[in-house]
Amino acid sequence: MARQAAEKEANHKKMLADTEEELIRQATSANPMVIILTLTLTNDFDTESSAVVPERLTGYSEKSTGCTFSDKNHVARVRKGSPAATEGGFLAGDTVLAVDGTPLKGERVAVALNREKKIEYQVRVARSTDTKGGAFGTIASGEHAGWLLMVQARDGSAQALQWPRKKWITLDAKGQIHFYENKRDPRPSRTESLKGCLCKTPVMKLRGQELDQPPVIKDYIKDLKFPFTLTWENQEVDHDIVFAATTSAERAGWTKVMQKVTKAFAEAAPTGGWLTKQGGRARDGFSALFSRNKKRWFVLTQPDEGFDPTFRYYDGPPQKSNAPRGTVVLNADAKLAIDTESSLPNAFKITSKGTNDPRELTTTLAADTRVDMDRWIKALRKAIADSGGKVEQLSKLRDEARRLQKASSHVTNLKQLANLERDELMGLTLKVLHEICEYLDIVFDRSTDKNKKKLVDLIIAQKATFSATVDATLALRTNYSRHEMSGQI
């Protein structure tokens, strides 16, 4: 049995080595159907604790990189939002040829990667130039390829030394648009991704009134063309591309398929934006009292096929490979609620415990507007629910928040009543005095303690005890404030 297994492994290794040689031969042929790329496979940050600053993991694993390899050294799967997708640019179907400059020669890629525990690896892959299939499904040939006029523009005008040129344009199923000088050219002169892109058709009229158009649009219309524009809002491409089709139907075909692709990108993209993080979540005692609220940029990535979501925060919108300042653990046990006790408006809180956390931590966050808070709550609710957790609908979360606010108002009233002088307390009803005693944690019996004077004496004595405790607390706070505060996570 051992001999047969060894022979089978040797044959498998030879088959992989032969495949590698064939792919390299195809990439160097006169009409290549394969291209060779060097990509960076990076490990993710440790997200199993909310209490520490995340650090990059080392060594290869599917979970830490987001990339799964098949037994034939193909990229079998790339997880959405993972380093392999966002930083590495790996695509399902890529075939690995080498790791850190060393050819595999039939060795399994996972073995080669784990030979050395590193944060990142340089991986050489072979990628087919065939664009059929992919993340966005097959796009009909009549809609994704054809001749168009195009020009680069900024602020509605063609850039200097730029004028409309006729190009053969193809849109592949991976959401990339390719520009060719001639239809039969083997390689495009330019390629752009539609990730982060908006496809717009000019609005010609509003309420029956003709609208003024930017110069580049006017020029196309003057030549009886049908323009549409690609704009990258986050400057992935630092200019607009303005196309023009020869017919309205041709333009409609292009805009329909481009909007389908941009919608798919938008749905796959993580939720991101500014939130105010209330300080002190990982601190105890007086240290927590002096923690400051800070504005952070949060990024939420939804769970994907068995992997928990990630919810990280940064000093600002993250650039490629930026380290997060911290993370909020999201899993099936995470609890989400509107925070009625926070001094911040539009606040909500997440209580969770990571694998490496000694206890549950509650993170209070606040959005700038009620609309933004609702957007975040809906996205977080989906992330927790898709991880196997249970979260109430937004309407029920609001109902619970109103109930807690009502209870909080009652407590506030009791606190104010407890601060009344003796004569004023004597004027209160027996029911209210009982509630004040409960609020102050006074031991008494509702059924037998019905003497108002006795109850008022208990309240006065308890307030005196509280006053002494508060004085001691203030002294400790004053002493603590003389020391410089440490940085907050």
Image (cartoon, rainbow, N blue to C red):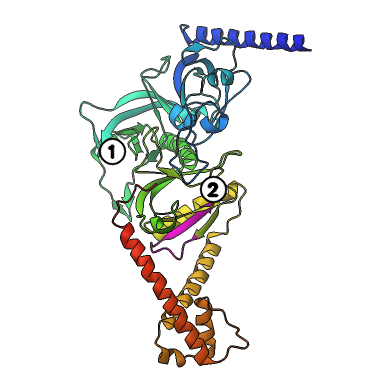
Q: CA distance from mark 1 to mark 2?
A: 61 Å
Q: Does 411 appear above or below 31?
A: below
Give the residue pinned by disc 2: 358
Instruction: Using a 10 Å C-alpha cutoff, classify the residue at mark 1 as few (fewer than 14 neighbours), some (14 to 19) or many (20 or more).
Output: many
The amino acid type found where label 2 is placed reads: Pro
* Residue drawn at (39%, 47%) of the image: 273
Residue 451: x and y in percent read 55, 92
Q: Is residue 203 visible?
A: yes
Viewer-nearest residue: 328 or 153:
328
From the viewer's perspective, tell me whether residue 199 is left or right of residue 15: left
Numbered range of the magenta stretch: 338-352
Image quadrant assignment for residue 251: top left
Where's the N terminus, which quadrant? top right
Residue 299: x and y in percent read 43, 44
Residue 235: x and y in percent read 32, 36
**Magenta run includes residue 332:** no
Residue 217, numbered label: 1
**Magenta run includes residue 343:** yes
Question: Label 1's element?
Answer: helix
The amino acid type found where label 1 is placed reads: Ile
Q: Does 429 appear above or below 59?
A: below
Q: Is residue 301 visible?
A: no
